[in-house]
Amino acid sequence: MPSTFITEEIELIQSDKGPGGGGFSGDGGNGGDGDSSGASRVPQRAYITGMFIALAGILMFFMAFVSAYIVRKDMPNSAWIPLQVPRILWLNTLILIASSFTLARAYSRFSAKDDEGFRHWWATTTFLGILFVAGQILAWRQLAAQGIFLASNPSSSFFYVFTGAHGVHLLGGILALLYVQFRATRKVQRGTAIEVISMYWHFMDGLWVFLFLLLYLGR
Amino acid sequence: MSSHAHAGGSTVHAPMAEPSGFIRKYIFSVDHKVIGIQYFLLALTAVVIGIVLSLLMRFHLVWPNATLPFVSGGQMSQEQYLALVTMHGTIMVFFVLTTAPQGGFGNYFLPIQIGAPDMAFPRLNMLSFWVTFLAFVCIVAAFVVPGGAPISGWTGYTPLSGLGEITGPGEGWGQTMWIASISLFCLASLLGALNFIATTIDLRAPGMSLLRMPLTVWGWFVTAILGLLAFGVLLAGGILLLLDRSAGTSFFIPAGLVVNDQLQAHSGGSPLLWQHLFWFFGHPEVYIAILPGMGVASHVLSTFARKPVYGYRAMAYAICAIGFLGFMVWGHHMFVSGMSPYSGFAFSVLTMSIGVPSAIKTFNWLGTLWGGQIQFKSPMLFALGFVSLFVSGGLSGLFLAQPAVDNMLHATYYVVAHFHLVMGVAAIFGIFAATYFWFPKMFGRMMNEPLGKIHFWFTFVGAYCIFMPMHFIGIAGGIRRYADASAVGFLAHLQPVHEFMTIAAFITGAAQLIFLFNFFYSLKFGPKASKNPWNATTLEWDTDSPPPIDNFGGHYPSVYRGPYEFSVPGAVDDFIPQWVEPSQVARVK
């Protein structure tokens, strides 16, 4: 279970906390206010809870698009021309699924306290994520080269909306991955950050597979 | 008794230092209390604008030909009237009814009432306020952009809202600003909801089990869940609408639409799709506005009747039930849209079933009052007013929930009267009750009681004088959104009723100046408030008025009992606060 090592990390920090510590320092320290006073008053599980909640909200956001897609497609006189999804999407999907595996690998390396292995697999995940986004942009360019734009047909409108909205969310994930790679140094935060980002990344992966199947099978 | 010792008692920590410097302390503060007050002041600004807009509408309905100094051309055009309708609705629903109870009081008191030093994510909290502020700037800016404010109503129905300037002044720039504002508001509310839920789940003090939370916290918590699941859907709808307007897509615009003799280049979209997306958000939004008020009413009724809330568990479960059912009834806003009678029937039955938890709540409010030693202080009066208005406004909902009746009444003032009583005025009474109740805690001074009572009676009687006759106008066929009903033959005889309502509206509006005066005067000159001026039982009364930066001055409270222990048999005091250990309760020998 992911939570096991989180607890360990917290204990680690608390054991070398000086006397009189424990002031409230907000999410990741309110500027300089509470940084010196030891562990944050906010339990690390709040970040996990927060990510679950955020994912529920994001799911509703995408489900609104999905329900609109289903309704719009089957409208009488919908003027719907099924969209041939660009072939490169298959490759992109494989890349994104692979990134989930490399991320899981990074995660287990981190649990095993193998920092070098962790950094290696974490960087691989980031690279695959960037590759995926590049592939999506390539798919857009291929469609555009065929003269298929956002407003060409409702099917293409939805294609651009789905890939665009998912791409923006994935870019956020890539920024978070880069942040952990280069910036997050405090151990207790790092452990939580890694867990929270993993949740987000796997979710975005699963969401993309769903959207891809919808675009491919439900066209 | 000693078994409670391990609960931690009051864990003492070094008190947290306040940020120095005006900007970090008051502007870009991460303190949930400052952010709560910021939300409250934003809502106060918005409500003043909203009331002025409604008074202009009421004025125009009675004196449509009057010359107004600030209107271009002297007389108000029908489009300008519709712009007032749109802006009044939007500003009131989003920036008052959503912002004040949840963003304002929820932000300020949820962490304190559960014994937390702040929200789970303080910087996210600050971000959500400032995005809300930006949304407010956008909506106000809609007045001054070329073409003026949008005219498509707070529901932004397509195709009117989807085609741009051709459908009317304000549908160009104004509507775009509207969509931008609403989208930003959605984003801010999602961040806020995330914070509220995580805080309630993970930051409760030792001993604060879910069923020991004050009903206010239940209200905010369930409201946040509704916001989390509803605002994302409106955000998605807003994005699609924006694409229809500016990128030439056809999500909501049907083919062959001719506007002002021009064929529109769209194909096959569905205006109903927008309505579904909008109302899937819009109905939960109604409960987002009213659930915090329900929590406040329960809280205040119990405190000033000196009795425990009757059926606390039932009250908490009823809030959850209302929230849950609130997601399944959006179709009742669309009975007249040509919906299948079978769907209409399902939506109708589900809608009426909300009457069950609502009746549980009302019954329990009355049960709380029954046999209590009622103290008619200002907050209590407004809480009683809340119950009254909620019942009066809710009952007409049972009529509107029937498709056959709704078909007749949907486009009339009956609906306007219904939702103003149950969602608008009732929620505002909840906000007033909260303001009078928590003002001493928030600002360290008491508000003036006689002024509060005068304010209550003017507002209470005034609200009924405005909205009760409105039902009759609706039944008589008075069509909502008509800028000038006096020009319509079969409605002309209703003008005297409109005149009565307009006069009532101006008096009620003026009475709000009493509140504003009381608020700002007491801020400076009110008598100092003690820690617990109402002899209340929840954690916010365990700390100074106003509370220190970390809420409890370096100690974290523990909780030993439920939130409403008033008139406990055998106890010396008539109330036992949540933070008092069992061994310290003074008992009658």
Image: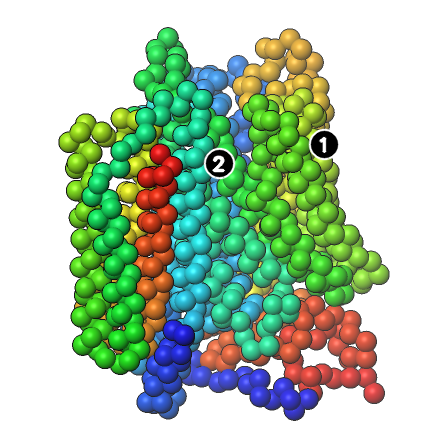
Residue at the location (28% across, 63% down)? A101
Expressed as whole percent of the image width and height from the top left, the position of residue B246 reads: 29, 29
Which kind of residue does numbered mark 1 sit on? Answer: Phe
> Quadrant of the rendered structure where residue B370 is?
bottom right
> Gap in Å between the C-alphas at discs 2 and 1?
23 Å
* Residue nearest the observer in this picture, B1 or B402: B402
Count of marks placed on residues? 2
B170 vs B210, left or right, is: left
Q: Which mark is residue B477?
A: none
Residue at the location (38% across, 70% down)? A26
Residue at the location (34% across, 59% down)? A202
> Quadrant of the rendered structure where residue B392 is?
top right
Disc 2 chain ID:
B
* Residue nearest the observer in this picture, B201 or B537: B201
Cβ–Cβ below 8 Å for labels 2 and 1? Answer: no
Q: Which mark is residue B399?
A: 1
B200 vs B351, left or right, is: left
Which kind of residue does numbered mark 2 sit on? Answer: Phe
Question: In this rendering, is residue B129 above or below B237?
Answer: below
Local packing at callout 2 (Cα closer than 10 Å; few below 14, some 14-19, many 20+) is many
Q: Which mark is residue B278?
A: 2
Disc 1 chain ID:
B
Local packing at callout 1 (Cα closer than 10 Å; few below 14, some 14-19, many 20+) is some
Expressed as whole percent of the image width and height from the top left, the position of residue B164 reads: 35, 23
Mark 2 or 1, nearer chain start:
2
